Image (cartoon, grey):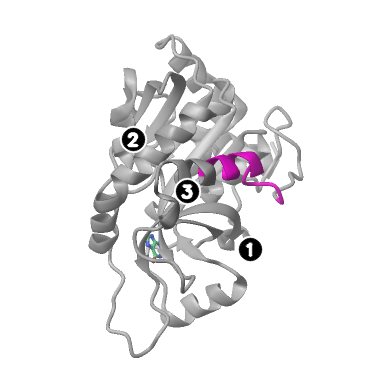
Amino acid sequence: MDALSCLSLLNRSSYDDCKKAADWLRNRTKQRPRVAIICGSGLGGLADLIDDKTIFPYEDIPGFPTSTVAGHAGQLVFGTLQGQACVCMQGRFHFYEGYSMQDVTYPVRIFFLLGVEILIVTNAAGGLNGSYKVGDIMVIKDHINLPGFSGQNPLVGKNDERFGVRFPCTSDAYDRNLRSLAIQTAHAEKCGSIVQEGVYCMVVGPTFETIAECNLLKKLGADAVGMSTVPEVVVARHCGLRVLGLSLITNKAVTDYDSNEKTNHEEVLATTCLRAQDLQRLVRHIVMKI
Ligand code: HPA
């Protein structure tokens, strides 16, 4: 057996593993979701709004990793949101927790095999754009896959054409129609004043960025920085899902050496608590119109 075949045996996101998990879920719920939602830190409350719930703790699902970070539950919630069949990941997997890129993105491939067409990802992010305020919601227009630059791309390795092509395009990663729907909906829901549209940059973490790193990311064209989302979006696009990404700006990234601000997880969670309702309302209304 060659080295690549050995690697794919170890890789839990092989087609057979994903299919096993998808079949396992399909046999236990009548729901056939069209939309999947991945909830970011402290944003799992979205799943509570789902009607006719069927809940699967991650530890019960074949091959599923378990979630460890504070602010994350660990369950897949099937049901309907505003009448739309949905599946919601309450708690996601992060590369900084020690999961591989394949672990982090395993659920997305299961969603694809379940027939999901649209992925909505939410996250908490630090604001780099000077005009952003804490509590703003950024519709992600594009991303910078910084871990990808150093080889940490979930699609590295043997390609399985049943998921997608060897060299997927990502210049259209965030669906234009879904982005404009999100912005229109924000205005209709009277939260237009807090909605931004910008570029999300993924860093691995778990350290928050240094001042020099924040200044570098700004120069690279990033408006917000966070430790998630990009691997899931890459895998979602690989298998043809349409993606909408929403970042809650939980803190302002520190870019000034005279500042006494120190980014910390408590601040991230506190802002999330304050704004979670607005973000949930926005997602609910977007889902209704999808
Ligand atoms: N940096 C990275 N990740 C984050 C931040 C940040 O400032 N805020 C929330 N997640």
- Using the rendered view, name the quadrant where residue 93 is placed: top left
Give yes or no for residue 175 being in the magenta stretch.
Answer: yes
Neighbour class for label 2 at 10 Å: few (<14), some, many (≥20)? many
Label 1 near label 2: C-beta < 8 Å?
A: no
Distance from mark 2 CB to nearest ligand 1 atom below 8 Å: no
Q: Which mark is residue 46?
A: 2
Label 2 near label 3: C-beta < 8 Å?
A: no
Distance from mark 3 CB to nearest ligand 1 atom below 8 Å: no
Q: What element carries label 1?
A: helix
Q: Mark 3 points at which residue?
A: 246
3D distance between C-alphas at marks 3 and 1: 23 Å
Which residue corresponds to the image point at 47% horizontal and 63% vertical from the top-left?
A: 225
Q: Is residue 232 in view?
A: no
Asked whether, in this view, residue 271 is left or right of residue 184, the answer is left
Which residue corresponds to the image point at 65% horizontal and 48% vertical from the top-left?
A: 156
Looking at the image, residue 241 lies above or below residue 43: above
Q: Name the residue under label 1.
A: 149
Looking at the image, residue 83 lies above or below residue 133: above
Instruction: Of the two numbered discs 3 and 2 on the same chain, state the one appearing first in sequence.
Output: 2
Q: Where residue 72 sits in the image (x, y, percent)?
A: 29, 43
Question: How many labels sit on residues?
Answer: 3
Q: What element carries label 2?
A: helix
Q: Which amino acid does label 1 sit on?
A: Phe
Q: Where residue 168 sits in the image (x, y, percent)?
A: 73, 44
Asked whether, in this view, residue 247 is left or right of residue 57, the answer is right
Q: What stretch is highlighted in magenta?
A: 171-182
Q: Where residue 245 sits in the image (x, y, percent)?
A: 51, 46
Neighbour class for label 3 at 10 Å: few (<14), some, many (≥20)? many
Give yes or no for residue 32 being in the magenta stretch.
Answer: no
Which residue corresponds to the image point at 38% horizontal and 77% vertical from the top-left?
A: 254
Q: Which amino acid does label 2 sit on?
A: Leu
